[in-house]
Image (tube, rainbow, N blue to C red):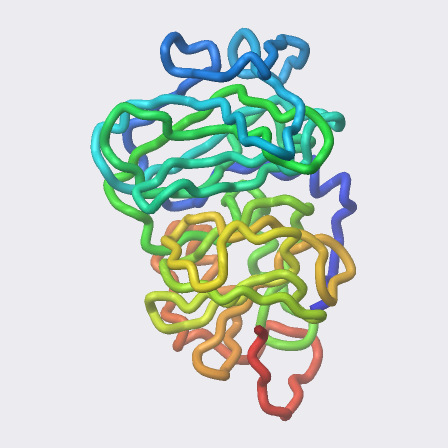
Amino acid sequence: MKPVLRWSAAAVAAALVLLGPADSAAAATTIVDNGTAGRFTASTGWGTSAWSAQRYGADYRFATPDTVASDAAWFKASIAAAGAHLVEVWYPADAGYNGATPFVVATTGGTRSVVVDQRANGGRWVSLGTFTLAAGDYNVVGVSRWTSQPGYVVADAVRITSSTGSPSITLPLARGALPRSEYDDPHHDYPAIDLPVGTGTPAYAVRSGTVVVIDDSSCGRGINLTGSDGAIYTYCHFSSWSVSNGASVTAGQQVGLTGNTGNSTGPHLHFGIRTGTTRRCPQNFLLALYDGATPPAASSLPTTGCFYVARSTAPVVPLG
């Protein structure tokens, strides 16, 4: 799974804009800043700063890591109706900030944690994923100090967007992470695609389904997602997982952060689709999603024409 990488790491980082899953329905949006009266709580362990120009509003809160206790700072929001909600966070980024800040979301299925690299992608809305939230007025998003990584953890602002229903299918990356031209590139030796994004880019479940975690020398850290359509969607080379083995996920939910683990020559997301033991070309599926169209069924996707090297006649050994 060695990608054909054409962008430098600097170019990838400069082009990366995280806008969240592509096709979640637009609806009411709530923004809570750390300065919103009665909507933010934090202990005395959290300081206040206006140093970074990337801040949202007048200032932001920061704290040193704590390997013993969470001491989370919380954003409180009024959720009008139970259902799917896109949760995004805003923070200033700096090389001296924390590379593995735990954000926690209070969902109907319990608290879920998403790790964010606050050294990158600052001064913009960064998606944590789509979560099912209960109705009510309560602490919805927290920023935890419980991390072993060095550098300040930062709590600045959150944005919560309700949806008229969970999206049924989404791109595996935020729509703004790559231009359309990247989604029709051939893979190097079998039906699949390598998507060149920098380490730490959130990857999302394309469909609802069940996760099997992969951790081997080929895929590196990754997952097989058995979708609600019966197809298997493979993600490889994560730097970290955002879900556990056996977890049930919804479309648009973050499943990992991209990286360079396993048999990889540079940071990217390897993405594949399989029906049974048959590998399918994912390019038409991804292009349709990028264009906002209904994608073809996995079983109808071609098995040739999307890779450079002649395919081996040996039996396919499923990843993971």
The quadrant the N terminus occupies is bottom right
Count the marks: how many? 0
Q: Is residue 62 above or below residue 111?
A: above
> Horizontal and vertical percent for residue 123?
59, 23
State left or right for residue 275 relative to residue 17.
left
The image quarter containing residue 107 is top left
Q: Nearer the viewer, residue 92 or 14?
A: 92
Q: Residue at horizontal 56%, vertical 36%?
A: 102
Q: Is residue 143 above or below residue 148?
A: above
The image quarter containing residue 141 is top left
> Horizontal and vertical percent for residue 300?
40, 76
State left or right for residue 101 relative to residue 274.
right
Please, which residue is most extreme toward the front here?
68
State left or right for residue 140 relative to residue 195.
left
> Horizontal and vertical percent for residue 62?
61, 18
The quadrant the C terminus occupies is bottom right
Q: Is residue 71 above or below residue 246?
A: above
Q: Residue at horizontal 59%, vertical 34%?
A: 146
Q: Residue at horizontal 68%, vertical 84%?
A: 310
Q: Residue at horizontal 67%, vertical 69%?
A: 216
> Horizontal and vertical percent for residue 223?
54, 63
